[in-house]
């Protein structure tokens, strides 16, 4: 059973562009690759919540093969 985990978060004012730039960095790719290897998860993506009433700035989506993978 596939399990999706969505992590919502805010960033400090004026730091969104820096975060988006970091997401493209080799460091970010290495970290996400390590998480994928250790848990069997798949990084789906990070999205900007653009809707007017959204309570958070960003959300990060992960796909896990099952609930047990969340414990790894």
Image (cartoon, rainbow, N blue to C red):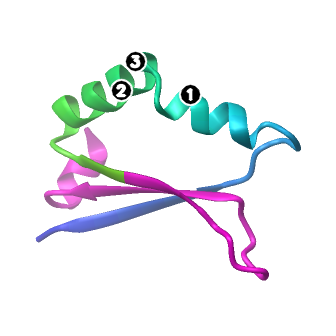
| Residue at mark 1 to residue at mark 2: CA–CA distance | 9 Å
Mark 1, Cα crowd under 10 Å, few <14 / some 14-19 / many 20+, is few
Q: Tell me: residue 19, above or below residue 55.
A: above
Tell me, for residue 22, which label it has, or none: 1
Q: Is residue 70 magenta?
A: yes
Q: Which secondary structure, mark 3?
A: helix
Q: Position of residue 33 (x, y in %)?
A: 26, 29
* Tally of marks: 3
Q: Using the image, tell me which numbered label, if any, was put on residue 29.
A: 2
Tags 2 and 3 in contact by the CB under 8 Å rule? yes
Q: Secondary structure at mark 2?
A: helix
Residue hosting label 3: 26
Quadrant (top left/top right/bottom left/bottom right) for the C terminus: top left
State the quadrant of the N terminus: bottom left
Please report the residue visible at 71 percent of the width from the left and 64 percent of the height from the top.
Answer: 56
Near-viewer residue (61 or 49):
49
Residue at x 46%, y 22% (from the top left corner): 25
Point out the stretch of residues depicted in magenta.
45-72
In the figure, residue 66 lies in which quadrant? bottom left
> Which residue: 46% across, 30% down?
24
Alpha-carbon span between mark 3 and mark 1 = 8 Å
Tell me, yes or no, whether the highlighted magenta stretch contains residue 57: yes
Q: Is residue 41 left or right of residue 53?
A: left
| Residue 68, position as x, y percentages in the image | 19, 53
Return the x and y of residue 64 as percentages of the image width and height. 22, 56
- Determine crowd level at label 2: few under 14, some 14-19, many 20+ residues with C-alpha closer than 10 A: few
Residue 15 vertical position relative to residue 9 in the rendered view, above or below: above
């Amino acid at each position: 059973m596939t399990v999706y985990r969505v992590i919502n978060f805010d960033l400090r004012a004026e730091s969104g562009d820096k975060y988006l730039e970091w997401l493209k960095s080799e460091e970010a790719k290495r970290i996400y690759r390590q998480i994928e290897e250790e848990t069997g998860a798949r990084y789906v993506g990070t999205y900007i919540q653009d809707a007017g009433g959204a309570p958070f700035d960003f959300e990060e989506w992960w796909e896990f093969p099952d609930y047990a993978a969340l414990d790894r």
